[in-house]
Image: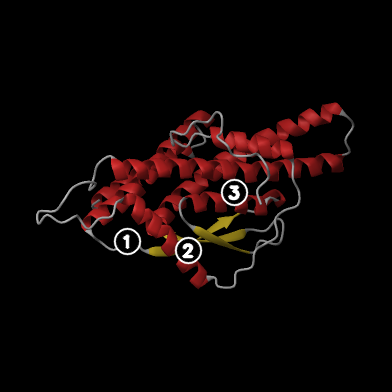
Amino acid sequence: MTEAARQKTVERVRGLLRMAEDPAVTDAESQAFTAKAAELMTRHAIAEAEARAERGEEPDAISRMNYAVPGVGGHGKARVRALADIAAAYGCQSAVRGNTAENTERTMILVGTVSALDALRMLLPSISMQMEASAKFMTSSHVSDIRELRNYTRSELETERKRYYRSFVRAYGRAVAERIREFRARLQENASHGGGSTGSTDCDGTEPSGRGAELVLRDDIHRVNEEFHKQFPQLRKHRPERTHSAAGYRAGYRRGREAELGLDTPVTGGGTSTLTEGE
């Protein structure tokens, strides 16, 4: 893929995301714009990997970027967990700085290929916007429902609100990450078997130097892991949140499977995944 073609794709994605974030559009329209942007960036990454392989070029460079995660409402850890799952689905590794104080901003440090980080840099804000809007709506509805069941104190309702919201966000991120992995795997398979260099030979009768998108992207993940452990050799795992709402987790997972991402993934009968809270 030429640099001009790459820039054209990036500009299309940015235009779609600008429309998605326009307050004048409906929720459905916003999701549709984000969906198309996600699909374009995913296909773009696969196409670039295949093109580099066919030309026998060096693989995509490994880089890193910082991504700010708000702690508003005391939900910072849940947001970090959700976005880290989504970043991992793009083949990236993440560390987090400042993930202790409840309401303060965190910094996620993402290590990945340049193309994967380009995609995340543009897509994470829009995906986060959809996730937060859905979490707020569903949490408000849940609290309203349980308020009618019996007399909760204000403190009890606030505790349930936080548990539900955090569980919803964690599950939403997990479900979106699953769908991204499914879509990327399907595109890799199509790239490997549906055309490109498969089965062809060069003019001298030898096999082309490209190994196919599937092998290239698999190698990318290995290289990212190596670089991540070089940069963070003594990374300490943070303790998971203890607050959990089964209802919030189920709702978040369901909404994550249903979110408009343009990934052609069935949203019903979510496969064999169990709806237990993440590790």
Residue 47 numbered mark, or none: none
Q: Give the residue at x 24% y 41%.
A: 195
Q: Which one is nearer the viewer's eye here, 134 or 87? A: 87
Q: Nearer the viewer, mark 3 or mark 1?
A: 1
Q: CA distance from mark 3 to mark 2?
A: 19 Å
Residue 136 shows in the view: no
Residue 30 position, x and y percent, is 49, 34
Q: Which one is nearer the viewer's eye here, 255 or 219? A: 219
Residue 166 position, x and y percent, is 69, 45
Residue at the disc numbered 3:
82
Q: Residues within 10 Å of mark 3 (few under 14, many from 20)?
A: many
Q: Is residue 165 above or below residue 212?
A: above
Residue at the disc numbered 2:
225
Amino acid beneath label 1: Pro
Q: CA distance from mark 2 to mark 1?
A: 15 Å
Q: Nearer the viewer, mark 3 or mark 2?
A: 2
Describe residue 42's horizontal placement relative to residue 233 as left or right: left
Q: Is residue 71 above or below residue 147?
A: below
Residue 208 shows in the view: yes
Amino acid beneath label 3: Ala
Residue at the disc numbered 1:
59
Q: Which one is nearer the viewer's eye here, 10 or 182? A: 182
Q: Residues within 10 Å of mark 2 (few under 14, many from 20)?
A: some
Name which of mark 2 and mark 1 comes first in the sequence. 1
Amino acid beneath label 2: Asn
Residue 64 position, x and y percent, is 46, 63
Q: In terms of secondary structure, where does tag 3 sit? A: helix
Q: Give the residue at x 62% y 59%.
A: 106
Most distant residue in the top direction: 148
Name which of mark 3 and mark 1 comes first in the sequence. 1
Specify the quadrant of the image occupied by residue 247: top right
Q: In terms of secondary structure, where does tag 2 sit? A: helix
